[in-house]
Image: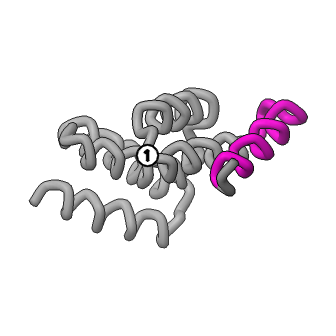
Amino acid sequence: MSSNSDRLVYLKELLAEDPQDSFVKYAIAKEYEKLGDLQTAIEKFEALKEDDPDYVGLYYHLAYIYTEIDETEKALRIYDEGIAVAKAQNDLHALSELRNARVNAEI
């Protein structure tokens, strides 16, 4: 068993203990992304967005995956949603990263 799949098992156990833990949900989505299972990563990020739309970290990574699979319009929409969340939270670091990534996605 690879270390990535070990991490995924561990994270799923953590999520079973606390099904509302947004960070663990985010980490699970990232593990699927690392494993190259982009469709499952998208599903996990989208579910997190539905459950906790204020979890600003998900927007950058979800939009990035959409750019990787050539769904630029979806990516731009997700970046815009993330920018709005970052503005509402006054998270200047996330706001800057999301804006820069959005500009790069348009190129």
- Packing grade of label 1 (10 A; few <14, some 14-19, many >=20) is few
| Magenta stretch: includes residue 19 | yes
Picture residue at 49% right of the left edge, 32% below the top? 40
The residue singled out by tag 1 in the image is: 36
Q: Amino acid at mark 1?
A: Gly
Residue 84 appears at what percent x and percent y? 41, 48
* Left or right: residue 67 compared with residue 44: left
Secondary structure mostly seen in magenta is helix
Q: Is residue 16 above or below residue 35?
A: above
The image position of residue 97, as x and y in percent, is: 39, 67
Viewport quadrant of the C terminus: bottom left
The quarter of the picture where residue 29 lies is top right
Q: How many marks?
A: 1
- Residue pushed farthest front? 1
Q: Nearer the viewer, residue 22 or 89?
A: 22
Relative placement, left or right, of 95 versus 53 is left
Kindly identify the residue that appears in the image at 55 percent across and 50 percent down.
Answer: 30
SS class of the residue under badge 1? loop
Question: Magenta segment range?
Answer: 4-21
Q: Is residue 64 magenta?
A: no
Q: Position of residue 74 (x, y in %)?
A: 26, 36
Q: What is the residue that sits farthest to the left in this orientation? A: 107
Residue lying at 56% horizontally and 56% vertically, measured from the top left: 89
Q: Is residue 81 left or right of residue 91?
A: left
Tell me the residue at 48%/72% (across/down): 93
